[in-house]
Structures are given as structure tokens and as C-alpha cells.
């Protein structure tokens, strides 16, 4: 897909971070956007900003944990707005893990898997039958993470586990559509090349009451990229970050180039991935990667 003008893009997690940047980037290209999120205030603010720029935009509250919410989102896209051409399964959260994993609350695991993995599964289930039935050129892009798909960091086992599962689902979807010679393209987006400065560090702001964390539960204390930067500087390390707008441009380029792997490497991360692959191929014991 080379031209986004006149296309409808549906974006989960569309009110902040990468999702918000995708909405503005696509709007600047002439696309219409349907943004979905659980944060009503952020959704309203983003919709207002898009409208001020003349972008054809609409919004809908959507909890990706719930298949009914995704079905309603797909219905709005196809039955009321003329049909989607671009779907971004982008919503995601972090559990704020701290300490040994055997001390984590069950709710940390359940919440992250319900949003990060089941959110993707629910999006696929709601949109793929309609995209295929439309028999038009279309793309579905799934936001993964090198943290889990390529590397495993010892301080984020919950998040890593969800993103490892997301990558397996994304690749399987790509392979199934390749075999079917479908017009629908699948793209795996890996935000970067550095840690992306988004609200995912403070995911607890949208944590639902049924996944409450105990008041005395260990907490990482990291709510923003600046918090992480300060922590790393205390250990004599530095932190580079990437703006979500840069990720959005990488995403659109990946769609235009019909790429499955959509990412920008930084040399340090690439080196860590290569070392992990060599560890697997040579059956040597893994060494925890360093953040960067």
C-alpha cells in the first residue's frame, strides 16, 4: 500500500504514545482515523487535536481485553465508516514489575496478558474476517517489542512473556495469510531504535479495578522515561530515547515497503540480539542483556 489518502485506519491504544502518533501521521497523509482507547479524557483530547488539524477522525472507547468491544469497533469501522484498510493492534501495558517474579501478584500477570496478548487476539478475531471478506488491499500492523520477541530482560518477565507470545501469534498470522495468498498484509512493528518515550511506564493510570495491585506490592518506581534515565545515570549509564512520532514514520514506511519486520535497530541492541542467537545456536548459557 503506497497511498493512504482516503483510507480508514483503526488504531487501538490510539489516544496516547505510538497510537496517537500514528493517528497524526496517517491524518497528515490524508487517511481517516478511528482511534480506540480505554482512557476517555485522552481520547477526547486526541480527537479534538486531530479535528483541529482537519483530519477526518472519530473515536470509540474500547477495552481490548473484551472481545465485544473489538466487535463493536469493527462494526463501526465497516458498517458506519465505509470499511477499514489499515488496522493497528497497538494497545499495550506494562506491569511495573519489581523484585523476583515469584513475588508478583497474579493480577500483574493476568492484566498484562489480557491486554497485550488477548488484545491482539481479540483484534485479529474481530477484524480479519471483515478484511478478508472485503477482498481489498489492506494491512494489519501488530505492535510487538524486541523485549520478549528477541531479548529477555531479567527485570521485566511479565512484559517479556506477553510480547514473546504476541510475536508468535503475529508470525503465525503472517504465514497463514501468505499461504492463502491473501490481499491482507501483516506487519510486525518493533518500536525503537531506542526506548520509546510513551505513557507505558505509567500504565497503572489505566489499570482497571478488577486487577488491583496490593498497596504493599513491590514497585519499580519508574513512571516515565525520565525516571529510567535518572536510575541508569545513578549507575553511570546513559539512556537514549525515541519519540513516538519517529516510530509512526517507521511504521508507515514499513507498510509502504510491504515489510513484515518493521524496525530501526540501534547497534547495541543488534549486538545483544546477535549474541542471543549465537547462544541458542551454540547451546551456550545465556548472559542477561544490558539495557540500551
Image: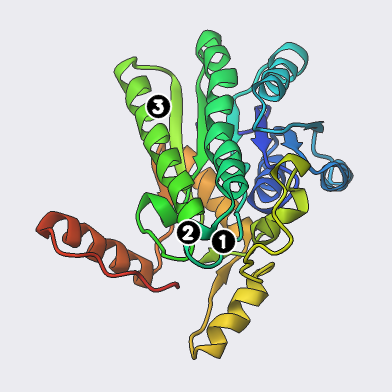
Residue 86, given in percent of the width and then of the height, sits at 59, 29
Q: Do labels 2 and 1 touch, CB within 8 Å?
A: yes
Q: Which residue is mark 3?
A: 173
Residue 150 falls left or right of residue 61: left
Q: Which residue is mark 2?
A: 101
Against 280, is 184 above or below? above
Give the mark nearer the N terminus: 3 vs 1.
1
Name the residue furthest top: 133
Closest to the observer: 8 or 100? 100
Q: Do labels 3 and 2 touch, CB within 8 Å?
A: no
Position of the C terminus, as image quadrant, is bottom left
Closest to the observer: 215 or 130? 215
Q: Which is more foreground, mark 3 or mark 2?
A: 2
Q: Which residue is mark 1?
A: 97
Residue 18, given in percent of the width and then of the height, sits at 63, 51
Q: Residue at x 40, y 17 (%)?
A: 182
Alpha-carbon span between mark 2 and mark 1: 8 Å
Residue 114 falls left or right of residue 280: right
Alpha-carbon span between mark 3 and mark 2: 30 Å
SS assignment at label 2 = helix
Residue 283, given in percent of the width and then of the height, sits at 12, 58
Amino acid at each position: 500500500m503506497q497511498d493512504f489518502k482516503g483510507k480508514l485506519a483503526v488504531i487501538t491504544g490510539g489516544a496516547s504514545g505510538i497510537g496517537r502518533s500514528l493517528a497524526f501521521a496517517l491524518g497528515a497523509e490524508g487517511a481517516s482515523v478511528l482511534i480506540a482507547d480505554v482512557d476517555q479524557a485522552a481520547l477526547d483530547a486526541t480527537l479534538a487535536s486531530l479535528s483541529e488539524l482537519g483530519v477526518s477522525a472519530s473515536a470509540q472507547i474500547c477495552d481490548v481485553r473484551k472481545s465485544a468491544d473489538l466487535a463493536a469497533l469493527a462494526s463501526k469501522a465497516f458498517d458506519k465508516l465505509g470499511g477499514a484498510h489499515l488496522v493497528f493492534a497497538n494497545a499495550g501495558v506494562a506491569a511495573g514489575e519489581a523484585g523476583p517474579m515469584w513475588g508478583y501478584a497474579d493480577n500483574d500477570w493476568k492484566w498484562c496478558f489480557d491486554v497485550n496478548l488477548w488484545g491482539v487476539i481479540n483484534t485479529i478475531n474481530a477484524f480479519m474476517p471483515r478484511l478478508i471478506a472485503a477482498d481489498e488491499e489492506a494491512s494489519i500492523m501488530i505492535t510487538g517489542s524486541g523485549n520478549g520477541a528477541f531479548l529477555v530482560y531479567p527485570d521485566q518477565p511479565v512484559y517479556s512473556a506477553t510480547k514473546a507470545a504476541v510475536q508468535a501469534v503475529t508470525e503465525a498470522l503472517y504465514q497463514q495469510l501468505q499461504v492463502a495468498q491473501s490481499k491482507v498484509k501483516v506487519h510486525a512493528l518493533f518500536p525503537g531504535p531506542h526506548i520509546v518515550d510513551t505513557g507505558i511506564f505509567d500504565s497503572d493510570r489505566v489499570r482497571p479495578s478488577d486487577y488491583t495491585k496490593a498497596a504493599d506490592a513491590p514497585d519499580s518506581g519508574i513512571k516515565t522515561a525520565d525516571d529510567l534515565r535518572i536510575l541508569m545515570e545513578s549507575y553511570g549509564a546513559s539512556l537514549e530515547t525515541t519519540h513516538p512520532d519517529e516510530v509512526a514514520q517507521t511504521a508507515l514506511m514499513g507498510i509502504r515497503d510491504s515489510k513484515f519486520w518493521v524496525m530501526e535497530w540501534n547497534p547495541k541492541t543488534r549486538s545483544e540480539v546477535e549474541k542471543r542467537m549465537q547462544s541458542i545456536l551454540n547451546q551456550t548459557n545465556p548472559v542477561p542483556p544490558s539495557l540500551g
